[in-house]
């Protein structure tokens, strides 16, 4: 059995190329909440009064829907990648197309149909995130990879667009209890993001167009977050978590200073 010191010594130091890749991932995270997402957040803020007029249980309904959608996606997305249909719908572009169609249908009847459509949209996003994982050398069907895909849904809270870096080097438990614990941790952040999506779909018929646009944007958003998450994980496997995150957080801090000074 290796000692901790031996395991640390197995990790090679970061070179200039790796540091450049990490800084590029920090830039990618910063750009993820781009013009389209900001527009959707603006529209959602305007329509959010509709949600405030709903019964008090509506917010709890969104939280419950977020948990149910994540659970459904975790269980279904990996299985749905097999077979001819699964292989046909197996690219970022196709996932965005399917999510866009799903959002249009879900938004047609306002909030009730938007909530009913949520598991479908979340599964499309989950599949897209799994596809990103494969690009970075991880097996989409592996239980550990599926849990890491779940962790990506923890990105963004109260307008923030950062990933939760505490998952990057972790070996997540594979028991049913561990899955439910992770979903319980991720779901509140996902629900906070969903509030904006559902707010844009709250008005029947008009919500169809909003649903199509938001689903496209949300798929793009989580795909970008997945690139950051799994891109960092790939470098962590070779160079260790502490070294990678030091460079990543330093790059984010530098960008924030630059943005303030601009």
Image (spheres, helix red, strand yellow):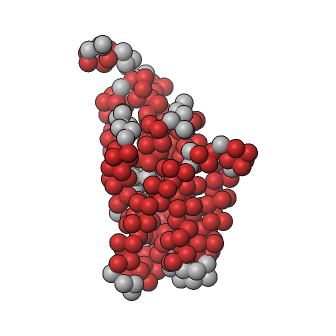
Q: Position of residue 167 (x, y in %)?
A: 36, 40
Count of numbered marks: 0
Query: Which one is nearer the viewer's eye here, 113 or 5?
Result: 113
In the image, taking residue 5 as reference, residue 26 lies left or right, namely: right
Q: Position of residue 89 (x, y in %)?
A: 69, 50
Q: Position of residue 123 (x, y in %)?
A: 55, 55
Seen from this angle, which residue lies furthest bottom?
53
Seen from this angle, which residue lies furthest front?
176
Query: Is residue 210 in sight in this rendering?
Result: no
Residue 70, image quadrant:
bottom left
Residue at left offset 58%, top offset 42%: 131
Query: Quarter of the image containing the N terminus?
Result: top left
Query: Is residue 95 in sight in this rendering?
Result: yes
Residue 11, image quadrant:
top left
Q: Is residue 19 above or below residue 252?
A: above
Query: Which one is nearer the viewer's eye here, 85 or 8?
Result: 85
Q: Is residue 194 above or below residue 15?
A: below
Q: Is residue 68 above or below residue 18?
A: below
Q: Position of residue 91 (x, y in %)?
A: 66, 46
Residue at left offset 44%, top offset 83%: 50
Query: Quarter of the image containing the C terminus?
Result: bottom left
Query: Which one is nearer the viewer's eye here, 203 or 159?
Result: 203
Residue at left offset 47%, top offset 60%: 69
Residue 235, image quadrant:
top left
In the image, taking residue 101 as reference, residue 35 lies left or right, namely: left
Residue at left offset 41%, top offset 70%: 62
């Amino acid at each position: 059995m290796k000692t901790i010191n031996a395991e640390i010594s197995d990790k090679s130091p970061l070179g200039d190329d790796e540091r450049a890749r990490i800084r590029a991932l920090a830039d990618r995270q910063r750009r993820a909440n781009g013009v389209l997402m900001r527009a959707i957040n603006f529209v959602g803020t305007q329509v959010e009064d509709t949600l405030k007029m709903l019964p008090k249980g509506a917010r709890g309904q969104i939280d419950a829907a977020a948990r149910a959608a994540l659970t459904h996606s975790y269980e279904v997305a990996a299985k749905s990648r097999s077979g001819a249909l699964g292989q046909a719908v197996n690219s970022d572009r196709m996932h965005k197309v399917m999510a866009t169609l799903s959002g249009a249908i879900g938004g047609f009847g306002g909030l009730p149909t938007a909530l009913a459509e949520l598991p479908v949209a979340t599964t499309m996003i989950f599949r897209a995130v799994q596809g990103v994982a494969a690009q970075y050398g991880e097996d989409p069907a592996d239980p550990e990879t599926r849990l890491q895909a779940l962790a990506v849904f923890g990105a963004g809270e109260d307008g923030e667009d950062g990933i939760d870096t505490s998952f990057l080097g972790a070996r997540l438990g594979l028991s049913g209890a561990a899955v439910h614990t992770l979903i319980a941790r991720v779901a509140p952040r996902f629900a906070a993001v969903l509030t904006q999506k559902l707010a844009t779909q709250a008005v029947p018929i008009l919500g169809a167009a909003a649903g199509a646009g938001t689903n496209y944007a949300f798929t793009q958003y989580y795909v970008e977050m997945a690139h950051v998450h799994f891109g960092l994980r790939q470098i962590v496997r070779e160079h260790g978590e502490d070294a990678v995150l030091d460079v990543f957080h330093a790059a984010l801090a530098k960008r924030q200073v630059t943005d303030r000074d601009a």
